[in-house]
Amino acid sequence: MKTVAVIGGGFGGIAAAIRLRARGNKVTIYERLDKLGGRAQVFQRNGYLHDAGPTVITAPNLFYELFELFGENLEDHLEFKPLDNWYRFHFNDQTQFDYGPDREKMLSQIESLSPEDVSGYLAMLKASEEIFKLGYEKLAGHPFNRIATMLRYAPDILKMRGYRSVYSFVSEYIKHPNLRQAFSIQPLLVGGNPFTTSSIYSLIHALEQKWGIFFCMGGTGKLVVELEKLMLRNGIEINYASDVSHFSTSKKLITKVNFTNNESKAFDYVVSNADPIQVSTELLKNEKISLHNRLIKKYAKHSMGLFVLFFGSKKCYENVAHHTIWMGPRYKELLEDIFDKYHLSEDFSIYLHRPTCTDKSFAPKNHDSFYALVPVPNLKGDQNWSELKEEFSKRILNALDKTILPGINVNSEEIFCMTPEDFKADYRTPFGSGFSIAPILTQSAWFRTHNQDDRYKNLFYVGAGTHPGAGVPGVINSAKVVESILYDD
């Protein structure tokens, strides 16, 4: 039996703790906050419930596996409800497009917008399935610690033209500008610009088609609670409000984990769910770090920041979907402002979450619960969010009031927000980014922080900043990669 410290209780840390405990190790989680979940926090305000982080389940089998490792059935504890409309797109020209599992409905909508794109959409799905077979089934759950692994798969990546952007990939098949937006926007859900993110991420289309999109009844917070219970039932120790100050090292090992309360403990393995750059900058700040991690620390392109506005509504908006993508007047130019210029524009786009569409427990009777997520520059933009957030909140509500939520300025209540400054303070993400480093090709697979540290052989990484990347399937799969390194190599 080996002793394992898991630093951080986000989904990556939780999955790693469960997998390594199932292998017979003595596992302890150290969480800096007073509850698990990482970005998947829950806020409650006078009867309104808000999931602060991820809101969709796109690869449910990954969670089923975690329960099955201990001979349990997820369905005895949780209900994953399939959504029959995945996303509703509201475009700036006031047209709408429902994106979901009903193939005939999808094709009918595409035909009404652009008949020539019907065959293009079907061809795009077929191409996405081929990329899925490589990018997800072959690569997502396997280590990329060695350059030889990257070289082995490089011909396949080049054959599929992984150097293209997602937008370029979509544009080969789709002509209508609104449909191009709808089918290329998925990289934003994992922190990437569709115009620079590798087309490997177009596998998301196939992933959605394979398993669908689900909502966890009770919210993502309920999912975290049941995973916490699963860990406690099976002997995983969880320490809350346990903040790591730094790691002590000797030669090529982490010898001690040092905490801010002056305690120090030794472990056989340390699994970090913290951002890898934060580990290099803070937890290993007085120690040597590998050349690979030094280069990432110095040259990394970070994901965008997020502004998240939470609010309740005294009125129920029954015609608003569970997930709405509200598109602003600009697409490519807005993304350039956010990712390249770090400029906060006058216009914006919104991901609007209305969980009360599916689960009425998120709000008082005949009320609605919402959050509006707006991609914004990360803190490299040097915006003063303490001064900007009130006015920016009003602009978001005004835009929704004029379009899909008429009267929300009057009906909204219990309004509060999170800014990139909050992401940096609460989650210690460099520059307050929402998803660690951006998923461009030169920051994918071997080019990301390796799941096993190149210098300290008992230090491992899970979460958004390591392979395979951000998003719930990515961070859960990162734990499978660590398990593979320890037990399959």
Image (cartoon, rainbow, N blue to C red):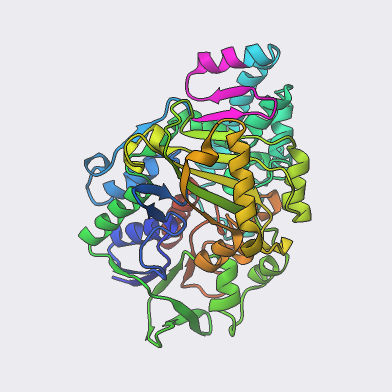
What is the residue that sits farthest to the bottom in this orientation?
262
- Depth check: give the residue in front, 254 or 45: 45
In-image side of 227 versus 256 (left or right): left
Q: Was residue 102 drawn as part of the magenta stretch in this picture?
A: yes
Q: Was residue 77 drawn as part of the magenta stretch in this picture?
A: no
Rendered position, 266 above or below 64: below
Image location (x, y in percent) of residue 397:
58, 42
In-image side of 377 versus 214 (left or right): right
Q: Is residue 61 visible?
A: yes
Which quarter of the figure has residue 124?
top right
In-image side of 68 versus 264 (left or right): left
Question: Which part of the image, by quadrant, shows the N terminus?
Answer: bottom left
Image location (x, y in percent) of residue 346:
74, 46
Rendered position, 103 above or below 229: above
Magenta-highlighted residues = 86-109
Q: Is residue 149 visible?
A: no
Image location (x, y in percent) of residue 52:
46, 52
Residue beneath the point at 57% across and 59% down: 465
Which quarter of the figure has residue 111?
top right
- Depth check: give the residue in front, 446 or 193: 193
In-image side of 439 versus 4 (left or right): right
Count the marks.
0
Image location (x, y in percent) of residue 147:
64, 58
Residue beneath the point at 60% across and 55% down: 390
Which quarter of the figure has residue 41?
bottom left
What is the residue that sits farthest to the front in this orientation?
410
Residue beneath the point at 57% across and 39% down: 134
Residue beneath the point at 42% across and 71% down: 32
